[in-house]
Image (tube, rainbow, N blue to C red):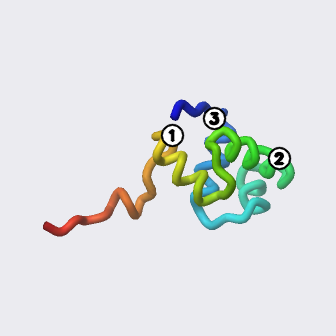
Amino acid sequence: MDVWLTEREMAVLRLLRGSLTLPEIAAELELSPETIKTHTRVIYRKLGVHNRRDAVSQGQEAGILPASVAKRNEVTSD
C-alpha cells in the first residue's frame, strides 16, 4: 500500500498510537480539537480504515509508523 501522509498527519497518527484523547492530542500539538478530528478523518480515509486501532495497525503494516515499543522489545523463546 502506497500511502502518503503530511507531516502533521504523521504527528497525529503517532499520537493516536497512545492513550491520549483527541482533545489531549489537540492540546499536545497546540491545535483545535476540530482540526485533530479533521486530520483523523483524513488519516482514516487514506489508510482505508474506520477506527484508531486499525489506523495504527495499518500504519505499521504500511511501514509509515514504527512498530510499538512492546513489539520491538519482544523476546522469543526457542
The percent position of residue 1, horizontal first and vertical second, equals 51, 34
Q: Secondary structure at mark 3?
A: loop
Give the mark, 2 or 1, whose residue is nearer the N terminus: 2
Residue at x-position 66% and y-position 38% = 46
Q: Amino acid at mark 2?
A: Thr
Residue ID for mark 2: 35
From the viewer's side, name the closer residue of 13 and 59. 59
- Residue at far left of view: 78
Q: Secondary structure at mark 1?
A: loop
The percent position of residue 35, horizontal first and vertical second, equals 83, 46
Q: Quadrant of residue 53?
A: bottom right
Q: Amino acid at mark 3?
A: Leu
Q: Quadrant of residue 6?
A: top right
Q: Amino acid at mark 1?
A: Ile
Q: Please state which of the two labelled residues, at mark 2 or mark 1, is closer to the viewer.
A: 1
User: Is the residue under label 3 in contact with that under label 1 (CB below 8 Å)?
Assistant: yes
Q: What is the distance, in whole Å, between disc 2 and disc 3 at their CAs?
A: 15 Å
Residue ID for mark 3: 5
Residue at x-position 60% and y-position 31% = 4
In the displayed structure image, the side of residue 54 where residue 29 appears, left or right: right
Q: What is the distance, in whole Å, between disc 2 and disc 1 at their CAs?
A: 21 Å
The percent position of residue 77, horizontal first and vertical second, equals 18, 69
Give the number of the disc on residue 64: 1
Give the mark, 2 or 3, whose residue is nearer the N terminus: 3
Q: Residues within 10 Å of mark 1 (few under 14, many from 20)?
A: some
Q: Residues within 10 Å of mark 3 (few under 14, many from 20)?
A: some
Q: Secondary structure at mark 2?
A: helix
